[in-house]
Image (cartoon, rainbow, N blue to C red):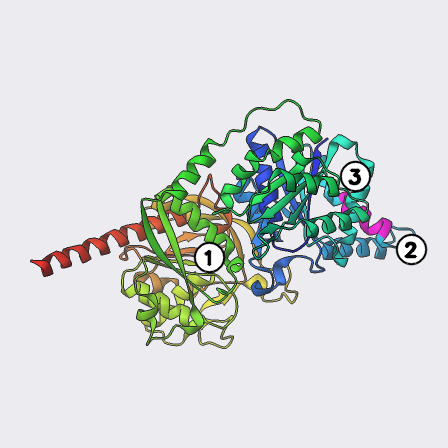
């Protein structure tokens, strides 16, 4: 049987429970344990698939096609292992399951209540991964903040599990905030005391308290927190702000968070952690040899979490190329033919981001045209690839009214069209083309050079596709379909062989990029941007020398 670690949060949201959970999992994995992480979210949506990116950030997609919380991306990036639908559960999914059972008569006429029926379903799902026999330790992050009404059933489920399991099979880690008052020049522990008190009132007592702080915790502060929160001083963990989330595992290693957890779980024999690859990655990340500037052309740029996996993929690819990737957010809604050169000047590469809906579409098309005509490295993902197709149809094929039926349902030239199996679907949640699908790559293409193979699997999330009725026209004019789904004929990759680097993909390569296995497309894109930057700087240097002479 697996052992269980629960991570709760108090005082305020956005403290980084997901990063702490992922960091702890990384340390335990580095010591040889098989670890997985799951996220329980208190909102009533069945999954984040129908949530606005402004509301919730990006929707992360797993190999098996589950639309999940973005924290699952952190889990995969840190552990380099796949998650699944079982790793993310919401209140909506819990209630949906219980109500379906009630409608089917499974409760034999009993009154269905939060306790025991809702909490029993929560417990079943909390323990599910541990019963599969694949993992030694299961870490469960409880979304929201202790004290929230919607979190109460999850906390109650943890209380019951804490009562049911042996003491050395479960550990509760509570993440809180220790604010620093600059005027008084002191750290204040009262919010943490209140948070732990509130958690204890539900019957759950934390074994370890992790304290987010801007200033170091001295021994007196640790003793005070330990005394008033009823934990040992060595179980009060300092979590200082870090320059990058990838430093957090090493900070937690220094604080012995993993050792304290293992001790409380009754694990007394364990090897030293193997973190050489992780440290090597951090060295390259912190000490780059050069810099490139990438324009992220999107329409949700006000919220960085909307493109979380893309931004993290840039970090992974930058480290491999030993460059610092400076990402400049460019709102596509404000790009016009008149200002495009001004807005995109100085960039070493353009990534046109995924998205949905009409807003900002024309700006993305104009940005693609600029990259194509100015030989700037271009990378389009999902909607970004579709905009590249529309731009090419309008400006190279001469089909001036080319469009996507997503934005223009009655267009006479739907070069991007809704997938046939999507046309009869009315329900929005969980009905897109989701999860991993195969792709056959053309020999001699840029895609083959990038992947160094002819058969790949990538994750998808879309309803619209390249319209194959126009494929011959595109290829005759120089836009090649270099990646095709072997089962459906769906165009997965387009590229321009005569361009220094121009590629668009229907899938989402950012979803599979991890610290140890960066996404090949991002690695090659950043390498192309690096080459572009070096050529540009060399040309400028030569011109300056001529002027001096």
- Reading the chain from its start, which is encountered first: label 2 or label 1? 2
CB of mark 3 within 8 Å of CB of mark 2?
no
Between 1 and 381, which is closer to the camera in this rendering? 1
Helix, strand or loop: magenta stretch? helix
Can you tell which quarter of the image residue 500 is in? Answer: bottom left
Q: CA distance from mark 2 to mark 1?
A: 48 Å
Residue 430 coordinates in the image, percent (x, y)? 63, 58
Name the mark nearer the viewer: 3 or 2: 3
Q: Which residue is mark 3?
A: 162
Q: Which numbered mark, 2 or 1, is in the foreground of this view?
A: 2
Q: Is residue 464 magenta?
A: no
Residue 453 visible, this orientation: no
* Residue 7 in the figure: left or right of residue 433: right
Location of mark 2 (residue): 111
Residue 502, picture quadrant: bottom left
In magenta, the rendered stretch is 115-124
Q: CA distance from mark 3 to mark 2?
A: 26 Å
Q: Position of residue 416 (x, y in %)?
A: 46, 67
Tag 1, which secondary structure?
loop
Q: Residues within 10 Å of mark 2 (few under 14, many from 20)?
A: few
Q: Which label was assigned to residue 506?
A: 1
């Amino acid at each position: 049987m697996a052992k269980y670690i629960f991570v709760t949060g108090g005082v305020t949201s956005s403290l980084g429970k997901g990063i702490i959970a992922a960091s702890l999992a990384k340390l335990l994995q580095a010591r040889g344990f098989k670890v997985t992480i799951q996220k329980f979210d208190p909102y009533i949506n069945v999954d984040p698939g129908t949530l606005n990116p402004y509301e919730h950030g990006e929707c992360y997609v797993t190999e098996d096609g589950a639309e999940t919380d973005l924290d699952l991306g952190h889990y995969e990036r840190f552990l380099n292992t796949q998650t699944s639908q079982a790793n993310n559960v919401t209140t909506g999914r819990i209630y949906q399951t219980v109500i379906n059972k009630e409608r089917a008569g499974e409760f034999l006429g009993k009154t269905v209540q939060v306790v025991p029926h809702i909490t029993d379903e929560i417990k079943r799902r909390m323990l599910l991964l541990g019963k599969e026999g694949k993992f030694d330790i299961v870490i469960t992050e409880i979304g929201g903040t202790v004290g929230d009404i919607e979190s109460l059933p999850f906390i109650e489920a943890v209380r019951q599990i804490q009562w049911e399991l042996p003491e050395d099979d479960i550990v509760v880690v509570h993440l809180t905030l220790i604010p620093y008052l600059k005027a008084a020049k002191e750290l204040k522990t009262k919010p943490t005391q209140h948070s732990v008190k509130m958690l204890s009132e539900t019957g759950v007592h934390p074994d370890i308290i992790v304290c987010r702080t801007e200033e170091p915790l001295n021994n007196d502060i640790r003793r005070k927190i330990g005394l008033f929160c009823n934990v040992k001083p060595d179980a009060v963990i300092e979590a200082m702000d870090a320059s990058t989330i990838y430093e957090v595992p090493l900070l937690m290693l220094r604080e012995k968070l993993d050792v304290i957890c293992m001790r409380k779980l009754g694990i007394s024999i364990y090897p030293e952690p193997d973190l050489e690859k992780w440290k090597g990655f951090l060295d390259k990340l912190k000490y780059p040899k050069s810099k490139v500037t990438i324009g992220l052309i999107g329409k949700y740029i006000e919220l960085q979490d909307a493109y979380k996996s893309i931004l993290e993929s840039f970090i992974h690819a930058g480290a491999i190329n030993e460059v610092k990737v400076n990402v400049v957010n460019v709102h596509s809604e404000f790009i016009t033919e008149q200002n495009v050169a001004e807005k995109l000047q100085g960039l070493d590469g353009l990534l046109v981001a995924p998205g949905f809906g009409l807003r900002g579409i024309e700006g993305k098309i104009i940005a693609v045209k600029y990259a194509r005509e100015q030989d700037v490295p271009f990378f389009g993902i999902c909607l970004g690839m579709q905009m590249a197709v529309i731009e090419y149809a309008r400006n190279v094929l001469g089909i001036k009214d080319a469009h996507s039926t997503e934005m223009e349902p009655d267009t006479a030239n739907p070069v991007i069209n809704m997938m046939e199996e999507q046309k009869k679907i009315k329900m929005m949640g969980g009905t897109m083309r989701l999860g991993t699908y195969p792709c056959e790559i053309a020999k001699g293409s840029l895609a083959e050079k990038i992947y160094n193979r002819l058969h790949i699997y990538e994750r998808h999330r879309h309803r619209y596709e390249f319209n194959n009725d126009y494929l011959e026209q595109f290829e005759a004019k120089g836009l090649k379909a270099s990646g095709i789904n072997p089962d459906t004929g769906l165009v997965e990759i387009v590229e321009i062989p005569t361009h220094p680097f121009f590629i668009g993909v229907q899938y989402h390569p950012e979803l599979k990029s991890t610290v140890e296995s960066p996404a090949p497309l991002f690695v090659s894109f950043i390498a192309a941007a690096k080459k572009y930057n070096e050529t540009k700087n060399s040309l400028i240097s030569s011109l300056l020398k001529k002027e001096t002479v």
